[in-house]
Image (cartoon, grey):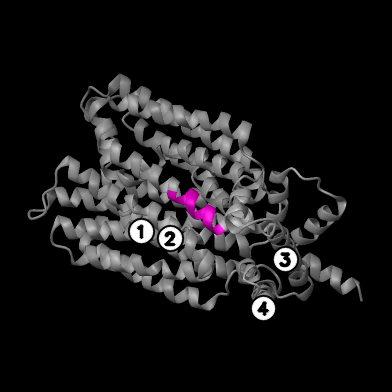
Amino acid sequence: MFDSTLKRFWKIWEWGIGRTVAATIAAHTTSISVGMCQGYSAVLLPQLKEDSYVNITTEEESWIASLGVISTPGGALIAGLASELLGRKATVQLTSVPFLVGWATIALSNNKFALCVGRFVSGLAIGMASACYIYVAEISLPNHRGFLSAFGPIFVSLGVLVVYSLGYFLYWQEVAVLCAVVAVLSFIVMHFVPESPSWLASKELVTEAKTSLSWLRRNPAMCDSELANILQSLKVAKKQSEQGSSMCSLLKQCSSPSVWKPFFILTFFFIFQEGSGIYIVLYYAVHFFQKIGSSLDSNVASILVATVRLFMSIIGAICIQHFKRKTLAMISGMGMGLSMAICGLHSYLYGHLPVEDRMYRWMPLLCVVINVCFSMLGMLQLPWLMTGELFPLAMRGLLGGLVSSLAYLFIFGTIKIYPGLEARLDQDKVMWIFSAFSFCVVIYVKLFLPETRGKSLHEIEMKFKREDYTEKDKDFDQEANKTPNEVYIISRNDY
């Protein structure tokens, strides 16, 4: 029985999606560092307030939290340029370097300035990690792309849980040392996976692209079909670029519906995402639970929510594989809106009382847990996932980096203004603002978000251009959508 199980797993590794999954996991080990960096301020700030030699004010607290994000847009732009010039794999691997430098600086810091420098550098690495989504989107088959791209939020959630848990037992500098070790491991594992075949083909390295596909798919028929699809997209892009000078060609590409439509769709999607308060709960977890009056210890409540977040990120990955993107996004926004509205109502009715005198003291924590559950079904991961889906191959790296940098700029804005907003408004009004943005997402997704589940990247690009989609094109994409096992059966029947 053991032998048959072993053979089954070996068959999946050799002829299924085993190697693609392995490459996806290798790329998203970087996402563990992203989660650790995002959750670290929730560990750091409460300990700094109790520290005898590093005293911080409320203004300094907001800067320490937001400095982990302020440099992130620059990192995303660097990732966009580097992924075009150096390759997707190389960019993901290089992301580990600023993570390592940032964590080492934090671990060795003994003053606020060094601490801020470490946060700034590690924030740069968060932005560069956006290259993971482009890499995974380009190595995945259409039928598996949503599921594999959702590994990113799973590993980010794992990083958040790990850093919250470490912060409960260890001092903040010791936590930084362990985070640096994770960055080193990420650099090592990326050495063993291939470069994106799409990027290799775009650099006219067709042989290397086929070798990369062969490693990932392990089936000649599948490799030939997929490579032909990639080359077809590149041929169309090259033909457009040859119709004028390089600057004119760039402007013409930017004016194409396949470029500006995804750009604005994703930009506004990210604006609604940040307005819903997702990252405020993440960056200020311990402080947030103190303010809303949780009946549990704030640190324990943070670990509980991080555990739920990890579990729901796995559920979300499964749902993305089986349900439409628009459906998940609308359900996610509706659930988040209702949970924050109820949390705001509880704060409005009982917020003026001491925590021990409030009725239903468990209600705020329950609302936040429900909010996190619904956020992991769509609102959190879908905008990031779709940065690797919506843009055309010729500009995917550059525009993916640009949109990611804007998203991180929005995150910085929300993280920086939250303490001031909280000081000027009652807690119930803050919750209702989060609720309003979440409800707006439902309307926005219904009207504007395209459905990409099960579609090849070539098909998505063509749909944005509104070109006639011939039967030949459809057959071409259907062939590309087949799993390796389906193509293997077809190729065997041909003989």
Tell me if label 2 and label 1 are in contact, CB under 8 Å.
yes
Q: Amino acid at mark 3?
A: Leu
Between disc 1 and disc 4, whose residue precedes?
Answer: 1
SS at mark 3?
helix
* Residue, disc 1: 124
| Residue drawn at point x = 80 percent, y = 67 percent | 487
Q: Nearer the viewer, residue 3 or 291?
A: 291
**Camera-side mark, 1 or 3:** 3
Q: Quadrant of the C terminus?
A: bottom right
Cα–Cα span, label 1 and label 4: 32 Å
| Label 3 Cα neighbours within 10 Å, binned few <14 / some 14-19 / many ≥20 | some
Residue that badge 2 annotates: 78
Magenta residue span: 397-405
Residue indicated by mark 3: 231
Q: Is residue 29 left or right of residue 263?
A: left
Q: Which residue does the numbered mark 4 point to in the structure image?
A: 211
